[in-house]
Image: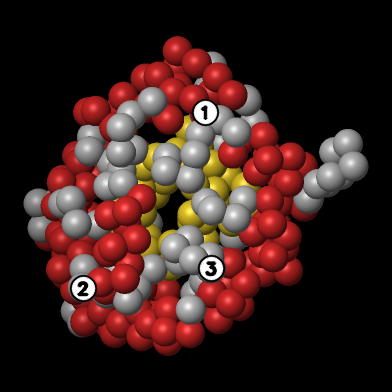
Amino acid sequence: MNRQQLIEQIRLKKSYLCVGLDTDIEKIPQHLLSEKDPVFAFNKAIIDATRDHCVSYKINTAFYEALGLKGWEAMEKTVHYIGKDHFTIADAKRGDIGNTSDQYAKAFFSALPFDSVTVAPYMGEDSVKPFLQYEGKWAIVLGLTSNKGAADFELQQAGGELLYEKVLKTVSGWGSPDNLMFVVGATQADEFINIRKHTPDHFYLVPGVGAQGGSLKEISEKAMNQDVGILVNASRAVIYASSKEDFAEAAKAVAKGYQEEMAGYLGKK
Ligand SMILES: O=C(O)c1cc(=O)[nH]c(=O)n1[C@@H]1O[C@H](COP(=O)(O)O)[C@@H](O)[C@H]1O
């Protein structure tokens, strides 16, 4: 999905919600465990229930890789089931020397039909560029993350600026707002205005509302640009809204609630 199509979907649905499919076999409702592929059965129900309220799904590959071959198969079935109308993110946080990153890009963009992959920038340009070589596909590079450990490196001074600022400035020169997004944690609201100054036109993937306590209102007020420019992810708050048989309806209600709040912020733009 290209930038224009993504913006169209956001305007059409009045939503910039990304539902995170961090599907943990230990947390899915008991009654699904008798299914042949419980993880896919769970995802399918969540997707059916939430697809009208979100524009994107983020599959955190860790939860699937942890199950071996079965998990990878569930991931593959899930990304195909989502289809082309939603922006798909392989949250794999990849990045390695060039010829290895080439293979990671091939894994998610050719063997699998993801629109984007999350990428760690620590190894520099040759580790990120392979993800920028595919027409209509995106690299989503870690900028300022939502976790406590962001203070260890990202928020440290590096030659008169913060390390994450250097990352935003340098990495934005490797691609364009048409194939590059940045991850900015919802818990980092104090930095949003500064981040927008460095990267005015880019989309941000913003995880950390719901379970991590980030404020949708604050993000929306501080980080939106003229093209909306944000995808806000919630995983556990949506997919584990109920642990019982009504899990899909409960997920729908939470996703709808986020969407309605988003519609309000979009209306003010
Ligand atoms: O790259 C990410 O998606 C990510 C970056 C970040 O800074 N913080 C963060 O929580 N994430 C991911 O976003 C999701 C957040 O999940 P919830 O806290 O359950 O909504 C998880 O899949 C995390 O791996």
Where residue 224 is drawn, which disc sits there?
3
Secondary structure of the residue carrying numbered label 3 = loop
Secondary structure of the residue carrying numbered label 1 = helix
Asked if 261 appears above or below 227 in the picture, the reply is below
Question: Where does the image place residue 184, in percent across and percent down from the top left?
Answer: 59, 56
Asked if 29 appears above or below 113 in the picture, the reply is below
Q: In the image, what residue type sits under mark 1?
A: Val
User: In whole angstroms, how far apart are the C-alphas of marks 3 and 1?
Assistant: 25 Å
Residue sitting at 25 percent across and 72 percent down?
Answer: 12
Identify the mark nearer the N-term, 2 or 1: 2
- 267 or 105: which is nearer to us? 267
Q: How busy is the neighbourhood of tag 3: few (under 14 within 10 Å), some, or many (20 plus)?
A: many
Q: In the image, what residue type sits under mark 2?
A: Asp
Quickly name the residue at label 1. 128
Farthest top residue in view: 99
**Would you say 178 lies left or right of 141 here?**
left
Asked if 225 appears above or below 82 in the picture, the reply is below
